Amino acid sequence: MEFRHLGRSGLMVSEISYGNWITHGSQVEEDAALACVRAALDSGITTFDTADVYAGTRAESVLGRALKGERREGLEIFTKVYWPTGPGRNDRGLSRKHIMESIDGSLRRLQTDHVDLYQAHRYDYSTPLEETMEAFADVVRSGKAHYIGVSEWKASQLREAHAHARELRIPLISNQPQYSMLWRVIETEVIPASEELGIGQIVWSPMAQGVLSGKYLPGQPPPAGSRATDEKSGANFIARFLNDDVLTRVQRLKPLAEQAGLTMAQLAVAWVLQNPNVASAIVGASRPEQVHDNVKAAGVKLDADLLKAIDEIVEPVTERDPAKTESPAQRP
């Protein structure tokens, strides 16, 4: 495993991080989830990402049990706040009330007294940013989080939040956006702003919800049991990629992966790590062997000719519109 600084902070994270968005507490049984976490640890992964909303808070609990007994100082545990975790109008968003209550709930479920990174899961247009950042400052000063991050924030939002963080003297060091060969909306605005501000990216869906693994074939129905067939495991996210033009182009990546001595999944993960502003790529898994396969993307260097060949294949179907980085106009 290779490690990188997260933004311009002193925090080091594993190039491959383990995330449990659609697996723990929902898609796979707990024994399988625990086996995947053990595979991650055995593979050198030290960075684990979750959120209070995943599987209705159950994902945090599963991760907490899976990591129990591990040396806490040797791990980087990340979680998030924003999406609804209860029926009340204040069980969501980035108000001071929800943040202060949510951090305590997350720590209890994760069985730890602090998280290394506490992230705003989306931008909250219903709460003054000053209120949100002041609440995050109190979370940091109380010792419940070491650093602050955000997820899917626009460049302008990053700039405004960073200014507040500087004034409050708290470390805002990361953004967690979707990023892959097929989804490059952060490259035009978010990446340049982040480089200027010292913010690093922890990217999700580097395999475009599994499409870049090559298992979805043009003109054929999705494989039984795959994400595309399971409404509970993100089928709505993958739908945008499931057209024959995209799938045909993805199949053309296979000889490039073979040329590089990689599986298609490894190529996809390695590709996002070629961006120097990306500190870590989040991978999920329902089986330990998937973890062992994905971590082989760490430390891989793709040469310029290979990167150019990839661009030539996928460019016509690549999404680059920066407006696609968005948060709900109103709290969900």
Image (cartoon, rainbow, N blue to C red):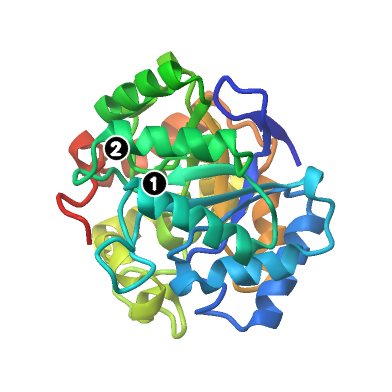
Q: Position of residue 242 (x, y in %)?
A: 29, 65
Estimate how packed mark 2 is, as few (under 14), some (14 to 19) or many (20 or more) residues with alpha carbons within 10 Å: many
The answer to which of marks 2 and 1 sits earlier in the sequence is 1
Give the residue displayed 50% in from the left and 60% down from the top.
213
Quadrant of image for the C terminus: bottom left
Query: What is the residue that sits farthest to the left in this orientation?
Result: 329
Q: Looking at the picture, does residue 205 appear above or below residue 300?
A: below
Give the residue displayed 20% in from the left and 52% down from the top.
328
Give the residue displayed 32% in from the left and 68% down from the top.
218
Mark 2 and mark 1: Cα distance apart in space: 8 Å
Please state which amino acid type lies under the numbered disc 2.
Answer: Val
Q: Position of residue 305 (x, y in %)?
A: 50, 27
Query: Left or right of 207: which side holds 154?
Result: left
- The label on residue 192 is none
Q: Nearer the viewer, residue 87 or 73?
A: 87
Which quadrant holds residue 69?
bottom right
- The label on residue 185 is 2
Q: Nearer the viewer, residue 39 or 149?
A: 149
CB-based contact (under 8 Å), mark 2 and mark 1: yes
Which quadrant holds residue 131?
top left
Name the element at disc 1. Answer: loop
Q: Can residue 245 be seen by looking at this rendering?
A: yes
Q: Looking at the picture, does residue 290 appear above or below residue 81?
A: below
Please state which amino acid type lies under the numbered disc 1.
Answer: Gln
Q: Which residue is mark 1?
A: 178
Q: Can residue 205 be seen by looking at this rendering?
A: no
Give the residue displayed 48% in from the left and 32% down from the top.
137
Q: Position of residue 107 (x, y in %)?
A: 61, 57
